[in-house]
Image (spheres, rainbow, N blue to C red):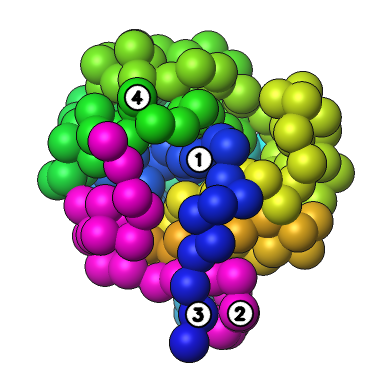
């Protein structure tokens, strides 16, 4: 049976988007707008956006601004001269609106962070565009619970090792809590950390990953379940 070895844990590391607050649902609203516009011009609107985002990833990375550029580029590429200025403006405004998404903490997040704060070092470890992620954390009201916030352009084994070094701990002394198997869980486990996977009800195409089990990983459905597996004062 998989379990967390709490005696080794010195820092609990939390992902932000779709772990602490809802993010992807707002992006999907913009995606649906794009699909309505380009649908008559292609066989698979979702695939068209995926191809654009994949090609742009190395140059643009993650975040609202990168997403908005990819959305507009996809519309221009697929629709050509049939894309109206009105439609392009609509996509632009929808993308800019993402910069102000509520970042309201998901159920159980505040209670969980409050309970764990006095017993562990709490870290927010998120990827994306710096200003956008900083603003979401500020709007969420959760910054006060974290001893350290790390915003990075990507989350791979390299970034997890660097985080452990920055915190002055070994990788096995970290517990990673997140929704993405690809970005949060798999690389954390690969460097020797433990992990708690909390699946979100929607997943971005570029974050999709085949499900798996691991002896150092526990899966839960809701954030507050974390308090049942981690003793705290």
Reading the chain from its start, which is encountered first: label 4 or label 2? Answer: 4
Whether 139 is among the magenta residues is: no
| Image spot of residue 77 (x, y percent) | 62, 51
**Circle 1 — which element?**
strand
Q: Which residue is mark 4?
A: 118
**Circle 4 — which element?**
loop
Q: Nearer the viewer, residue 139 or 204?
A: 139
Closer mark to the observer between disc 1 and disc 4: 4
Badge 1: residue crowd in 10 Å (few <14, some 14–19, many ≥20): many
Query: Is residue 180 something one can see in this rendering?
Result: no
Badge 4: residue crowd in 10 Å (few <14, some 14–19, many ≥20): few
Name the magenta segment's main secondary structure: loop
User: Disc 3 and disc 2: Cα gap in Å?
Assistant: 7 Å
User: Disc 2 and disc 1: Cα gap in Å?
Assistant: 18 Å
User: Disc 3 and disc 4: Cα gap in Å?
Assistant: 26 Å
Q: Check contact, mark 4 vs mark 2: CB within 8 A.
A: no
Point out which mark residue 2 bears.
3
Q: Quadrant of residue 182?
A: bottom right
Q: Which residue is mark 1?
A: 12
Note whether 137 is above or below 211 in the view shown. Answer: above
Reading the chain from its start, which is encountered first: label 1 or label 4? Answer: 1
Q: Nearer the viewer, residue 195 or 9?
A: 9
Whether 223 is among the magenta residues is: yes
Reading the chain from its start, which is encountered first: label 2 or label 1? Answer: 1
Reading the chain from its start, which is encountered first: label 3 or label 4? Answer: 3
| Image spot of residue 198 (x, y percent) | 37, 62
| Image spot of residue 146 (x, y percent) | 43, 20
Residue at (36, 53) in percent of width and height: 230
Reading the chain from its start, which is encountered first: label 3 or label 1? Answer: 3
């Amino acid at each position: 049976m998989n379990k967390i070895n709490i005696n080794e844990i010195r820092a609990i590391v939390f992902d932000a988007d779709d772990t602490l607050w809802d993010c992807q649902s707002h992006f999907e609203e913009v995606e649906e707008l794009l699909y309505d516009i380009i649908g008559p011009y292609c066989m698979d609107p979702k695939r068209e956006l995926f191809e654009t985002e994949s090609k742009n990833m190395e140059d643009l990375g993650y975040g609202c601004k990168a997403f908005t550029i990819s959305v507009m580029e996809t519309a221009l590429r697929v629709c050509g001269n049939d894309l109206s200025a009105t439609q392009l403006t609509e996509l632009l405004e929808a993308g800019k609106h993402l910069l102000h998404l509520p970042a309201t903490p998901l159920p159980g997040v505040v209670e969980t962070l409050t309970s764990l704060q006095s017993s562990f070092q709490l870290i927010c470890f998120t990827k994306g565009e710096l200003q956008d992620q900083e603003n979401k954390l500020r709007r969420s009201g959760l910054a006060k619970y974290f001893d350290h916030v790390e915003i990075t352009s990507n989350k791979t084994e390299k970034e997890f090792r660097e985080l452990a070094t920055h915190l002055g701990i070994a990788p096995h002394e970290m517990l990673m809590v997140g929704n993405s198997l690809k970005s949060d869980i798999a690389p954390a486990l690969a460097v020797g950390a433990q992990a708690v996977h909390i699946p979100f009800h929607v997943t971005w195409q570029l974050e999709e990953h085949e499900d798996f089990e691991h002896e150092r990983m526990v899966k839960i459905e809701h954030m507050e379940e974390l308090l049942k597996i981690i003793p705290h004062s």
